[in-house]
Amino acid sequence: MSRAKKGICMVIVCILVGAVAIVFGIKKGLFLSKQNQILLATVHTLEQSQFVSNLDLETILKSDYTANAQATINKVSVTASYAKKGEQKSLTTNIGVSLIDDKIKADFLLDGDVLKIQVPSVGTDIFSYSYQEEKTGCLNNLFSENTTEKIDDVLKTLSAQDAKGDAQNGKKLFGEVFLKEFRNLSFSKADAQVFEVNGKEQKCKAYQTQVTGDVVEHFWSQIAELYEGEEKADVNAFLPDTLLEKIKENTNVVKNSTCTFFLGDGQLAAVQVQTEDVAYTLELHGTDERGTEEFRMKQEDETLYDLKYQDTDGSFKLKDGQYHAKKVTGVFSKEADVVNLSVSEFQWNRLSGALKLSLQEGADESQFLQGDAAYNLNTMTDKEFRRIFWKLLWIKGDTNEN
């Protein structure tokens, strides 16, 4: 996906999430402004969506939990188990290739800013790595600075789950900023268009606003103040600053664009973002009488992606509308404190396979990596790394012979 498409998708998602975050502020009042009509219609649309409801994992992720995954992609099989208990996060992986008998097993434990690593299939030694410590050894030669920065960002994001702040309050603070900035926008009526809403075609009224560079910069300046204020721990608990930077990078593409919102039957039927070069539209078709939800992303009149979800059994199908090279089919469901995703068919350009994923409350601490680290990857020299590497290969070869 191009940077522009990714940015447009991110902006539309931010609008939808922002609307949900401020539901408490617009459900009151009989006479609504254009801004509040849009927000209220968005809330109605998302509240009625079983698919969107299933995506709400907050109740599970705020406590200890375990995620298990099994995947086969291009004849490479992977099983993984990720668990969070307090400040500790454990990841166990098994990777196998169809042409090789052995599987590579690796265990990881993130405790605060320190990551411990063990590869039982080649040895029992434990390695440690801290994203806060300076890297003075072999890592500078093994990986580029950009790669290590990405690794550090992932670890920081995972560690941010332990923020001592109140995520609910952080969500409320975000909603208040979004509400204020959205209400400050100037909206005007636009030409009505026909969209499908809940299985029927509706002539939808339209409101549009201009999103200038100044509007975008002011919004981000207000968000930045949240991360510098007294309640920054709450904000980080809701959205880690490492993720915020990624969102910011991808949303700046909408500077100097026109956003149009189409409302029909009390719901948000579509959002269109017109940049200087092209128009992107997200259509939210709602739920038809058979319980089928549909979401469609378009570039001008061409469909980029189409998602259909069946409320009754959780089955879904995602496909692209351009080259028919991307298709995902499966079942996505949530019951109480357990979420299940089963992908029976996965085709994404040259990648193909299947996937099973489950997420549930509770973590088994006995699966966590135990022991002290024998080696520090932050300071390990090239000579020391080569010595350990050949030692591990020798142990592995000796084990295979026996």
Image: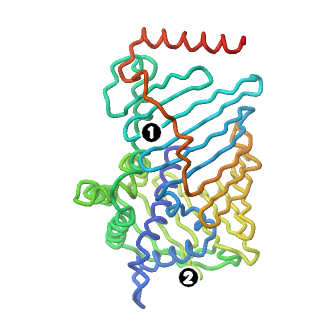
Q: How is the image coloured?
A: rainbow
**Labels 2 and 1 touching (C-beta < 8 A):** no
Q: Helix, strand or loop at disc 2? A: loop
Measured from the top left, where is residue 18 in percent x and y? 43, 66
Q: Residue 369 in the image: state x and y as whole percent.
A: 51, 35
Tell me the mark number nearer the camera, choosing from 2 and 1: 1
- Residue 110 position in % (x across, y down): 45, 39
Q: Residues within 10 Å of mark 1 (few under 14, many from 20)?
A: many
Q: Which residue is mark 2?
A: 266
Q: Amino acid at mark 1?
A: Leu
Point 58% across, 68% down: residue: 53
Q: Is residue 51 above or below residue 61?
A: below
Query: Residue 367 appears in which quarter of the rendering?
Result: top right
- At x 64% / y 79%, what residue is drawn? 202
Q: Is residue 42 left or right of residue 120?
A: left
Q: Give the residue at the far bottom of this rendering.
A: 30
Q: Which mark is residue 110?
A: 1
x, y percent for residue 323: 71, 45
Q: Is residue 67 left or right of residue 375?
A: right
Quadrant of the image containing the N terminus? top right
Relative depth, front residue between 263 and 335: 335
For the image, the number of numbered tags is: 2
Q: Compute the Cα span from label 2 to label 1.
A: 47 Å
Reply above or below: 333 against 141.
below
Question: Which residue lies at the image location 75% right of the left edge and 32% below the top edge?
Answer: 75
Q: Is residue 148 above or below residue 315?
A: above
Residue at image x 69%, y 55%? 318
Q: Earlier in the sequence, mark 2 or mark 1?
A: 1
Q: Residues within 10 Å of mark 2 (few under 14, many from 20)?
A: some
Amino acid type assigned to the residue bearing label 2 in the image: Gly
Q: Is residue 340 above or below residue 392?
A: below
> In the figure, residue 141 lies in which quadrant?
top left
